[in-house]
Image (cartoon, rainbow, N blue to C red):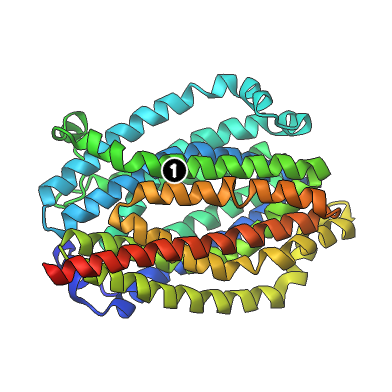
Amino acid sequence: MARMTEAEFREYSTTGNLYKLILQVGTPLAIFALFNCLFSILDTMMASHIGTIDVSAVAYFNQLRMILSSIGSGLITGSMILINRAYGAGNNKKAGELLNTLIRLIIIISLIFLLIIPFSPILLRLIGTPEEFIKEGTSYFNIMIAATIMNFINLIYINVEKSRGRTNIIMALNIASMILKLMLTALFIYILEKGILYIGIATLITYTSFAIYSVIHLTAKGSIFQIKPALILHSGKGNAKGIVQISYPVAIEDSAFSLGKVVVNSMAASYGAEMVGALGISNNVCGIATNFENGFSDASSSIISQNYGAGRADRAVKAYRSTIVITLAASIVMMAALFLSEDFLFTIFSTSKNGLDQEFKNTIRKIFIYDVTSCLGLAVNGAGMDFLLGLGKTRITLVINFMRIFLLRVPVLYILQHLITDGATALGVMMMISNCSIAVITTIICFSISSKLLTERRKS
């Protein structure tokens, strides 16, 4: 879409055609998400080249990293709800104060994360990490903690640009970053023949480069969303408290969701360490469709928040309904593409320097057959979750994600392990049941809230 000023986009967000708006803002995010998944797959392929234990270790440690990452990303998500409300209402001063308060909180969290690094082996053993993973991946995990800290800066910048509708910039920068990451990983793995530690180093270099760019643009003068050292130190009474109150459910739910995945991986490891890798690969492949469709729902969250802040609750509801249509259409297209390319993808994932592991390939396919059906449910669920986030209903999203993991995933897998002897089939069915069931629950909640908002709008 044509570059607009911050004031022009605010007007477009609160008055423009919603289907066109969501598509214009969401398409670059969806394309970025698609490339992100494809590059993630290539990254996993490179880890597979080292060996199946190594790729399984990378999948495992990435889940642990997501627990830490979700604390900061949850804080950023919650903050942007308030920032977008202020932006949508035309309160530029408040939006700037909130952004700088967010920066202060992220700095505090980052310092705490750095203190974890010396104690990571102890922490990994306490949570039951397989010993072979600790041996192969502790240094990788430590590097990824540092990379996560750098990425917090990037997430803030990405969310600011999304609020301004400048998602083309997000797409271009992230694709450039992913190309750099892959080039570095290929250099370390194929040419220098290094281990998974260097996959982490490639990530750290990439995130740091992006962070430098982000800081330069976040400190640019004349913007509503400008970092100012004076405001970081003192940015308005009550701002930090407001951010924490709306953000902590998001941070808890994201951390709990990632923790739930770790629990699932631990249960999957009872079938053997390679089963963790097979589940991770299936999730990554299905994530091509899921993340593509979520690009549109992600865009709608900012639009919903801005309209809600501008007093247009009816338009926020219309944006949610428009997002369901768009994400379902995107999901159908991407699922068809996955079915057409599954054999090619699984062959690549199952091939290491020792050749094709046919048994590992068959294991991945068994999980995928059921896992891929989740994409339709996740399209509907994603639209609903971003609708709730846009409205600031973070406590509801917390409950929903707790249900998804600790009611519809971990207990279901426990039951299936006693009913189905084949581990891959049990894991695949578990993914299908949890992701489709939660979509029904989320939709019922969202339609109930929508009805209430529209009723209140008509009365006012």
- Depth check: 322 or 3 in front? 322
Instruction: Locate residue 265, reporting x and y percent.
Output: 69, 43
Residue visible at 48% across and 54% down? 177
Q: Nearer the viewer, residue 377 or 32?
A: 377
Name which residue lies at 16% across and 30% down: 234
x, y percent for residue 309: 18, 58
Indicate left or right for 437 with 1 as reference: right
Q: Quadrant of the C terminus?
A: bottom left
Q: In the rendered image, which residue does mark 1 sit on? A: 151
Q: Position of residue 187 (x, y in %)?
A: 66, 48
Looking at the rendered structure, the number of numbered marks drawn on it comes to: 1
Would residue 167 be visible to someone looking at this image? no
Q: Horizontally, is 330 left or right of 236 in the view?
A: right
Q: Quadrant of residue 72?
A: top left
Question: Is residue 66 left or right of 96 when viewed as pictured?
Answer: right
Asked if residue 232 shows in the view, the reply is: yes
Q: Quadrant of the N terminus?
A: bottom left
- The amino acid pointed to by label 1 is Asn
Of residues 395 and 350, the one drawn nearer to the viewer in this rendering: 395
